[in-house]
Image (cartoon, rainbow, N blue to C red):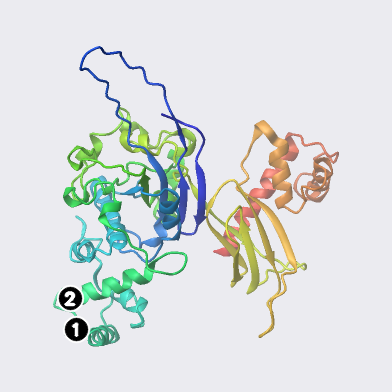
Amino acid sequence: MGAENEGIVRQVSAGGIAASHPELKPVPILVGPSVADEFNTVRSFLVPSACFRREDNSFDFDSSFIFDFDAGPLKDLMILHAGSKLSIFGHTDPVGQDDFNKVLSGRRAQSVQGLLLRDVALWEDLYRSHDTQGKDKWGVKSVQIMLNQVKFLTGRADGVLDEPTKDQLQKFETARGLAPSGFDGKQEISKLTFKQLATEYMDVICTDDDVKPFALTREEFLARGKGKQGKGDIQGCGEFNPILLFSAADKARLDQKDNQRERNEKNRTNRRVMILLFGAGSEIDPAKWPCPTVKEGVTGCKARFFSDGEQRRKNTADEREFAKTKDTFACRFYQRLLVASPCERVLRNFDIRLYAPDGQVIRDAPFVVTVGSRKPVKDVARDGFVRLQDVEVPAACVVEWGLPAKEGEEPELSFRLEMFLDVQQDDSNREAEATKRLHNLGYPERFKLQDNVLAFQRDFGQSRNPALRTDGVLDDDTIALLRNVYERCDDDLGQRRA
């Protein structure tokens, strides 16, 4: 079967992306005629009909404990694709060791499934164990987070076991009719207390758009829970299928100690949990499922690599995105499932600084921002910045903002700005690139391009390039200066925010 279109993105939010996969058109099948008892058998491939991607910001770094799960988009997809069966794939970024990343990604997939199923046993397993390097230990911090969410406030969520934490746990146990057992010598809580606390916490963080608890059954998963250790229902893909691979030069720079924070931020799009929805009636035999279990090592994964799988994993001269090059996934099985997925795209973050007419940044500015077809977001820019998270680019946005209102008064949004997000260098169509860059710099696209170019040349030529012509022609010198001015604005934004 072949794809009819590129799929439909249903929702993009700070939590991730939900989309329907391309519709498939029938492929003609040639069959042989028979005059006896022979018959032809046709078996279709397992093809996902939709995807729901959760971003890394639901987890701490190197941790599988989950903070939140907005299930509204997943619920909407399951209504739209009625009867679908789910399978969960965890991923990490391409940093660190294969074995560690395989285990961590599997633990995250298990964490999400446990949440969706309200299966406390899956969480209990994670709580009382850790990865091969001992990093992913839920410990006291997870208990503090859960207590805080169910309104037994500990005053902290840093993993330090203090008297207020002990006191709040005891109050929780007493209020729920449990024996006050507290923390044991390993700084762990009892099974009964964990079961009650985790169950309440799951109902708080996993809700739909009506803020009602959202849960599934094992029958709604691809393998129906019949596989050993969740085989077929949950997978840990480790670092084998990144959406984004840095160029070799960028990797060398970002791996330096002082740049690792930037590296981790740029790699965030790779650290994801992907939920695939397969068509109604889809079912698999777990014994024949190609992926190893979440607790098995990397050998089974590597057996499914492309012949050039290790080469695909390498950083080359150019940065590569899967949506553009289709050569960053090492696993051929995963690529076959996701090759046309709208969810396997790089989402980016943007900062927009809000000014008053006098050029001063407005702190505590009330604003409303709309990105593409997303729902408008209303908030206050505490430090004078609007932070746009997980944007599918290219996109356009509209920002309306104003001065802080007096107490008790409604804010007046006096200013309005339309912007193009992620304007890329495009030598094949310089006019389109220049139109967007100039618009974002304050030369509105409703004016003629020649007039905007002339105004830009007059504004910046004398101070930046006195030899620049002022004739409204978009020549090599003008486009080079325009790109330089535009990129320096980005640099200035980052430096001021830091």
Secondary structure of the residue carrying tag 2 is helix
Q: Would you place residue 406 above or below residue 4 in this image? A: below
Instruction: Count neighbours of disc 1 (C-alpha within 10 A) and say few if under 14, some if 14 to 19, many if 20 or more.
Output: some
Q: Quadrant of residue 483?
A: top right
The amino acid on which the numbered mark 2 sits, given as a three-letter code, is: Leu
- The answer to which of 116 and 325 lies nearer the viewer is 116
Secondary structure of the residue carrying tag 1 is loop
Q: Quadrant of residue 197?
A: bottom left
Q: Are marks 2 and 1 in contact (CB under 8 Å)?
A: yes
Which residue bears the numbered disc 1? 178
Residue 410 place in picture, x, y as percent: 69, 79
Residue 214 place in picture, x, y as percent: 37, 64
**Quick one: quadrant of the C terminus?**
bottom right
Which residue bears the numbered disc 2? 192
Residue 382 place in picture, x, y as percent: 59, 73
Horizontally, residue 497 falls left or right of residue 32, namely right
Q: How many marks?
A: 2
Instruction: Count neighbours of disc 2 (C-alpha within 10 A) and say few if under 14, some if 14 to 19, many if 20 or more.
Output: few
- The answer to which of 431 and 337 lies nearer the viewer is 337
